[in-house]
Image (cartoon, rainbow, N blue to C red):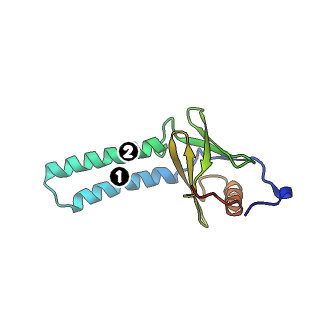
């Protein structure tokens, strides 16, 4: 479903620098790796090697997505009126993107996924990670706009 011509949305930019949910989930992932290693009842050397290897893989993935901070961390997302997205990172790069069909909208959360020239990016926004009015506007606009299946 698309909006009528008189209700065409304008630029929507959301400052997402203060989101904490991604870091918390990243730390929870490390806790899950530690718990899984402990529950496997492996010999000490094997458990340590498994923990270090699995933690490194989780850390690389979360760091690449910018969930643990760094230069790749997204600081703002902008939805243009023509449907394009621009993702701004901490190193002041503007990354052109298109919204993925994997995007999900909940009552108190948004799971945003984008296709970029360098692969996929994702972001979890919970209530409190951005201004409530901005999250509400984005949530309503996502529900009104159809996302093409890609």
Name which of mark 1 and mark 2 comes first in the sequence. 1
Vertical comparison of 107 with 118: above or below: below
Vertical comparison of 88 with 134: above or below: above
Question: Which residue is labeled 2 in the image?
Answer: 59
- Quarter of the figure with the N terminus: bottom right
Residue at position x 43%, y 46% in the image: 62
Q: Quick check: 145 left or right of 116?
A: right
Furthest residue in direction right, as rendered: 6
Q: Residues within 10 Å of mark 1 (few under 14, many from 20)?
A: some
Cβ atoms under marks 1 and 2 closer than 8 Å: yes
| Foreground tag (1 vs 2) | 2
- Quarter of the figure with the C terminus: bottom right
Task: Tell me how many marks there are.
Answer: 2
Q: Position of residue 126 (x, y in %)?
A: 57, 58
Furthest residue in direction bottom, as rendered: 107
Q: Quick check: 128 left or right of 38?
A: right
Q: Position of residue 140 (x, y in %)?
A: 70, 62
Classify residue 89 by image quadrant: top right
Residue at position x 59%, y 44% in the image: 17
* Label annotation for residue 30: 1
Q: Position of residue 60 (x, y in %)?
A: 38, 42
Secondary structure at numbered mark 2: helix
Q: Quick check: 82 left or right of 147?
A: right
Residue at position x 68%, y 46% in the image: 84
Residue at position x 75%, y 47% in the image: 11
Secondary structure at numbered mark 1: helix
Q: Position of residue 2 (x, y in %)?
A: 75, 60
Q: CA distance from mark 1 to mark 2?
A: 8 Å
Classify residue 142 by image quadrant: bottom right
């Amino acid at each position: 479903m698309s909006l009528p011509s008189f209700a065409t949305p304008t630029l929507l930019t959301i400052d997402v620098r203060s989101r904490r949910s991604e870091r918390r989930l990243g730390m929870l992932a490390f806790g899950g790796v530690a718990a899984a290693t402990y529950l496997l009842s492996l010999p000490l050397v094997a458990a340590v090697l498994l923990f270090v290897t699995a933690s490194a893989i989780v850390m690389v993935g979360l760091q690449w997505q910018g969930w643990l901070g760094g230069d790749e961390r997204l600081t703002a997302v902008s939805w243009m009126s023509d449907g394009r997205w621009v993702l701004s990172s901490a190193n002041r790069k503007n990354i052109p993107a298109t919204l993925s069909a994997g995007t999900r909208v909940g009552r108190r959360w948004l799971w945003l996924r984008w296709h970029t020239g360098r692969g996929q990016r994702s972001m979890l926004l919970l209530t409190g990670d951005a201004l409530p009015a901005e999250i509400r506007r984005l949530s309503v606009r996502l529900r009104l706009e159809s996302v093409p299946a890609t």
